[in-house]
Every structure is written in structure tokens, then in C-alpha cells.
Amino acid sequence: MSTPEAVVNVGADLLADAIADQATPVTRVDWRPPMSGTEAHLATVAADPLRRTANERALAAVLGVTATLVDVAPASEVLGLQRGEFLHAGPPIAWERASGPLRGGLMAGAALEGLVEDPEDAVALFESGANVSLEPCHHRSTVGPMAGVVTPSMWMFVLEDAATGRRTYCSLNEGLGKVLRYGAYGPEVLTRLRWMGDVLGPLLQRAVRAAGPVDVTGILTQMLQMGDEAHNRNRAGTLMLLRDLSPAMVTSGMDAADIAEGLRFVGGNDHFFLNLAMPACKLALDAARGIDGSTMVVAMARNGTDFGIQVAGTGDEWFTGPAQLADGLFLGSYGPDDANPDIGDSAITETAGIGGFAMATAPAIVRLVGGSVPDALATTRRMHEITLGENPRWTVPVLEFQGTPTGIDVSLVCRTGILPQINTGMAGRVAGVGQVGAGLVTPPAEVFPKALARLAELARGRA
């Protein structure tokens, strides 16, 4: 019997390893069966005559958006947020089911707005439900990192797609450690937030209005070439933003000490640009919403209790499952028992093809979230298996400038069993603790079969 010149191995590596030991070239195909119970729905969706064209339209719509920073203003002005109204990250949730960090963020927000004097007193306020309401950021064209709490007096970045005039929003980044978005609500948290409202917000507003629109999509393109992945590493992006705005900040006419403090704050906060990357990604993904037949995910978000996704072809419906604990590195003496399940709207970056999907362009990120450089490269390659295409603007130098994997396809996730990779910060599970670490996490697997079942139902209804 002659020895084959090459062998293709599908699935388990046991046979491939044995053949490779005989010096025969082996091509390994990572095949796995579809997620359990999805076979019939996969067949229905695959036969939907709208699917292919709808997905092409959805991907083209996302790739066609250019996000520019056009203003900075209070949430009461740009979102119409009223006293007692609170936005939060993730899918809808009531106080009774809210996680520790979300509760902590809401408590800080209530004190910031003067609804209570002591944040601890906000517990009774939210338990009563009197004159307060909770709503997801996504329902107001907004995204919020971690707890994602937005109150009327908080200042917001305003991003716009010049071609359509559509806008998205995000609050200003507080920095790391004991901050509202990680559920902290101590005096230092409120002091910083009040300074951001009194000084930083107005300073940035004057600078943005004087300097003209800032090309956020362009900065994202450059920072991915400079070692950022735009979720947990934003150092280059922050410095490029500061380069664009600092001259106008200096000539804003505000007090020199306030200008100096504002420059120090932004320049010393490597994560500052994250709160621009997030609404830029949402602006792009929202362009694909409402395309019948499309199986593309347009949002992944977590509130610390539930993880939810939304899909282009299913309207505003949320498909949810339990938020997962991240696997990663912890700060100081903290450990897994101190961490809350995954939280935040920042997975919008992965949904758009950066963050955890672009780890190959930022191998240094593994020092923060764990893993290894080969893991980072493998992750980006693997995400191409569950996406509709790639983004020619956002490329990965180490992978021969291949575009980042873009357009998560519900049907591909269900068919391959490969889950989207997210890199994330970890909040303490107890309100008031703050950040305890950073790591890697995936969505709960069941959200994708739920979305697939709905897509199949809609496809049958059109048949």
C-alpha cells in the first residue's frame, strides 16, 4: 500500500497526530457538530431566500459608517433624560435582580443627582420604585461600560455618521479603580464625577466645538496598527484624541488650572478612548438593524446578571442567558470568589470586530487579561469562522494586514459551536468594591440557539 502524499483530518486530532508522526503532511480541519437541537432551525434559516442578500446588506451597512465626535453635552440635553431616570448596561433588568456592581453604580448615580444624600439610602429608593426608572442604554442609542449607569447630569460624547445624521452616545470615562462603572460609590467617586460635570465636560465641549468633528473611525484604524485592540487597551487612541483636542482645550478660555487638570486626567487615563470606541461601534452596528432575514448580531451586552444579544433580522428583541464569570488575572489579593459575572455594554467592540476579536493586533493585552501571545493570534483567526466578512479599514499587521473578523453570524455560531471571545474587566460582586481584575469570557451558549429559533420562525412566516 502506497503512502499518501497528504492527509486531511476532520475533527479529533488522534489520527492526525499518528499520521504526522510518520512524516506525512496533515491538514487539520476543526469540525464539530452543530449545537444540540439546532439542526432543524439551521436548515430553515439556510433555506431562507432573504438570508444571503440580507447579510450582504447588513455587513455593507456596518462597514459604510464613519463615526465622528461632534459634541459633548449633558445627558439631560442629548438623551432627554429626566430626574429619576437611570440608564444601565445590558438587557432590561429590575432592581430586584440587579447585580452588586450595577446596584453600586445606581446608588452612586442617585447621590450624584441629589435624590439621596448618602448612597446607602438609595437602596430603599430603588426598592420602593417611587419616582425612579431603569432602562437599558441601548434603548436610547447609548452604550455604557461595566455598570453603564447614566444619569441626567452626566456629560456624554455625541458621535454622528455624517452620511445619515444618525447619532450614538456614551458617558465620559472615569479612569480605573474605585469608579462608578465598577460599582463603587464612595466620596472619592462622587467628587470625581462632580468635577467631570463641572470642569471636564464643559472643557471638552468647548474643544470639540472649536476643533471641529473628530474622526473616531480614523483613530480606530490607526490605533489598531499601534498595539491597541480598543476594548481593554486604548493607550494610542487616547493619546491621538488628546493630540487632536489639546490645542483647543488650551485656548478654550477656561481657567488655566482647570485646563491643566483636564489634560492631566485624559493623558493619565489610558482607557479614556474606550468611551469613544464603544459608541463608534454601536453607530456602525445600528446601521444594520431591521434588515429582515439577516442573521448578523448587532449587540452583545451584559448587566451583571444576564447576557443578551440582539440580531439585525429580529428587531429590538433580546435573547438572554446567565452572564458568565471571566477567567483571568486578579488585582492584589482578590480572587474568583470576589468577582461578579460579566457586565457592561463594552462587548459592542467585539460585536463590531475589535476588542477580543482583534487580540492579534494587540498581543500585549495578554498581560492584562491572561493567556499567551499565540492564544491572541489563534483567537482572531478563530473568530473569522463565525463572522460574515472582515473590515478592510481595521487590519491586523501580524496577520498580513487581514481585516478584523466582522459580522457575527448566529447561524455560524450554532453550526460550529464557536462562541465569540470577549476580553473584559471584572467588577467586584459586592456593591462598592470596584474593579477586582480582568480576563476573558464568552456569552452563554444558549442565547444563540434562542436567536436562531426566532429567525427560523420568521423565515417560516415569510415562506
Image (cartoon, helix red, strand yellow):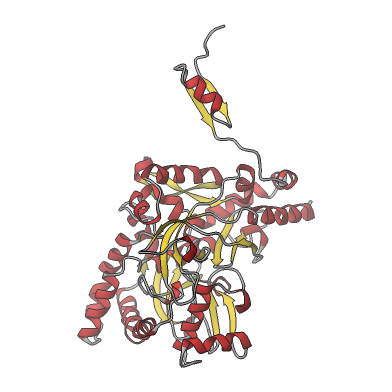
Point out residue 455 in the picture as x, y percentages from the top left corner.
70, 54
| Residue situated furthest left in the rendering | 256
Name the image quarter holding residue 91: bottom right
Q: Is residue 211 left or right of residue 280?
A: left
Name the image quarter holding residue 124: bottom right
Point out residue 268 in the picture as x, y percentages from the top left corner.
27, 70
Q: Is residue 169 left or right of residue 173?
A: right
- Up-down relation of residue 230 to residue 196 (above or below): above
- Up-down relation of residue 303 to residue 249 (above or below): above
- For the residue pair 92 and 404, the one nearer the viewer reads as 92
Q: Residue placed at 52% from the left, 11% from the top?
A: 3
Point out residue 130 in the picture as x, y percentages from the top left corner.
62, 90
Q: Is residue 262 left or right of residue 348?
A: left
- For the residue pair 367 and 383, the one nearer the viewer reads as 367
Q: Residue placed at 25% from the left, 84% from the top?
A: 258
- Up-down relation of residue 270 to residue 63 (above or below): below
Q: Determine if residue 251 is in view.
A: no
- Up-down relation of residue 132 to residue 454 (above or below): below
